[in-house]
Every structure is written in C-alpha cells, then in structure tokens.
Image (tube, rainbow, N blue to C red):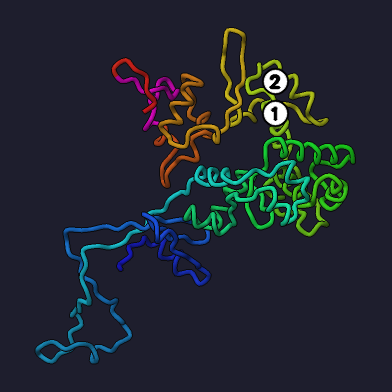
Amino acid sequence: KVLEVTKDMLAELEKADSVFQVRGLNKERAYLVTKDKTYEIQSIESSNTQLLIKKRDESIQPAKRLKSATGVPDTNRIVIEASTTTHMALRETIPSIYTLYQLLRTSPEYSDEEAEAGGTASALRDVIAGAKLYRFDDLCDALHCSDEELRKYLRMLHAIEINGFWRLLSTAFADDLIEFVLATIEMNGWAFDSVPVSRCVEDVKADYPAFLVHHALRLLCKSSSEGAGANGNKTIALDPAKICLFKAELLFHKKSTISDRQLMNEWGKMLPQGLMPDRNLLGGVAIESKTPEGVKWTYVTHLMLPALAADRMDALFELRPRWKLEDLRPYMECLRDYGETLEQLVLKHAREVDGYCVPIVVSGLAMAR
C-alpha cells in the first residue's frame, strides 16, 4: 500500500521515540494514532495511474549506475518499480468526547451503595454483576484515539479509575465527596493555594478512601498542580474559580432554574470566606434568560445537549433566540472538526445578524440547519 503524508506528519512518524498504531481495522474505518494525535486512514482512487520509483541512492558512483544503449552511465534513467491507481491518505481528526461519555454511561455510576460495600474486587462483582466495564485499552479501541487524547477527555468528564476500570461518579456521591473534602480543608484552616495532601487524606480516610480524596483534589486544583501530591508529601493548589463553580452547581443540582437574585444570594452564602460569586463563571454551565419575572438561570451543560451539531443548535435556539459567538463556545467547541473554526461550524447551522447568531429562516420557518 502507498501512504501519502504531509511533511509534518512524516517528521512526526520518523521521530526516534515515535510510537504509532493502527486501530479499528475490523471496523468500517481505520485510524493511525500517535501518542497524542489521531488520523483517519482514507482510501483514495485516481483515474490516473501513479508510477512508483525508488528514491535514487546518490552514494552510488555514476560508473556503477545503469548504462544506456551507448554504454555510457545514464544518470537520468528512472526504473519504475510498480504502479497503482489507489493510495492511502491521512486526515487528522478530533475524537468525539460524546462517544466516550456514552460508553462510560453504560457502566453503573460509582455511588454510596458501592462505596459502602468496601470497594473491594468482591464487592465490585456483587454490586455491578453483569454490567459492562471498560479498561483504558478498551476505551482506546472503542474511540480509535491516541492515549493522550483519551486521558484528556477522561479528565474533562471527571472519570476515575476504580479497580482498573474507568467509571463516572454519581452526581450525588461526587457532590457529597467534594463538599466533605472542602469542609475538611476549611475546618483545618489550610490555605487553598497550599493544601497538604497527605494530611487531607489522613483526616478524611474514615469517610472516604485515599483514591477518592485524590480525585476530589484533582477536580478542584489548578492545572499546574494536577500532578502534585502523588508522593503524599506535597501540597496542592486549589483553583478558587473551580471552588466557586462547584458551589454554584450544587445549587443547580437541587433546582435547575433559579432567579438571578436567588442564585447570587444563596451562592454567596455557600462560598468560603474570601470568595465571591461571579456570573462570568457560569458560561457552559447555565444559560441566562430574561423573563417577565426577571432574569433567570437554567442549568445546561454541553453533556446535556444532543451530540449532533444541527440538533444542538436547534436546542440552544429553543433556550435563547440569539447568541453571541463566544457564548456558544462552551457548547459547540467539542463538535468542531480538525482545522474548522468555531465560526465556520456555527454558521453551517445559523446566520449572523448584528453581531448575533440567529436561526436560519427558510420560507417563514426558523431553522437552525
């Protein structure tokens, strides 16, 4: 087979430490994956026959090259090794986080019931007997993506590895866990930018095992601190914005639509000393709407919306008739194809009027498509 690659792809594949695999061979499509990128392998047919030759070895002395009919070395002679009308090409793709999310949702969520069973392998078998569970390699094979991309998506979905399987925590369990860890930090008077991991684990171990405490801290920490605390002796820096957003989501988990006044009042009361509620943090978590009763906020995350771009735009326009492009980013960004801008994606399903994205109107009917 002949494989066409760009210079950048070739340089990546020829690196000394480059490791790549072909995944999905038994499916409709095959993918070549490096440690951090995914390429779809496409078969391309041409009406023109392509002639294949070997790269000339310039180290061979002219006298030893093929000779022409005159017996003089022919430095311009080319030997055709093979011909083809089909070749393979690579197209960089962005794996779908929604495929991963649906796979993880087929596994039972980790909840109080399983935690109370002790978290042992035998308890795992009893609580989730017959359920489909996924190891890391299983998810790689299902998504046909690189290891690094998969790890990134697992972090985005707040997934956790339990007894070798990747799972989602139930919303109620995750809320209680993070609340308990934050309460422990406040009770001990630890600064959010310097939480002693080992002491936090020790103080919480009677209620939650270490792997869950580490998970809660990772969800709240600054990006630069994600690897901290691995040896049990380091401190970890929590992100005040993530703490504020978590407290807001607690409110929305109890009531999906809240008036602006109630939200700001109750949110402020829940926050630790020194933190203030900020509406700017709610992008991608809640949608603001103006009603006769006043401004209201409705809990909507990108995981709650349809996975297809056209259907998602329909749903978003039902929630709000017009959108600023940047307000759509947290809801549409994960649906972009490789090389596609957010504006290009959105304007396939909407039109721009006076700086806003609005539904496309066809024969008097408003349509997102």
Q: Is residue 310 left or right of residue 295?
A: left
Q: Which residue ends up furthest to the right in the rendered image?
A: 188
216 is within the stretch colored magenta? no
Q: Is residue 86 above or below residue 229?
A: below
Q: Is residue 173 above or below residue 314?
A: below
Disc 1: CA contacts within 10 A as few (<14), some (14-19) or many (>=20): many
Q: Quadrant of residue 277?
A: top right
Given the image, on which type of amino acid does mark 1 rest? Ala
Expressed as whole percent of the image width and height from the top left, the position of residue 369 reads 36, 28
**Which structural element holds mark 2?**
helix
Q: Which residue in the protein does label 2 denote?
A: 263
Per the rendered image, the range of residues in magenta is 347-362
Q: Which residue in the protein does label 1 denote?
A: 248
Q: Which mark is residue 94?
A: none
In-front residue for pair 31/108 = 108
The residue shown at (43%, 63%) is 22
Q: Which residue ends up furthest to the top in the rendered image?
A: 292
Q: Which residue ends up furthest to the left in the rendered image?
A: 70
The residue shown at (80%, 41%) is 181
The residue shown at (65%, 30%) is 281
**Which structural element holds mark 1?**
helix
Q: Is residue 259 left or right of residue 62?
A: right
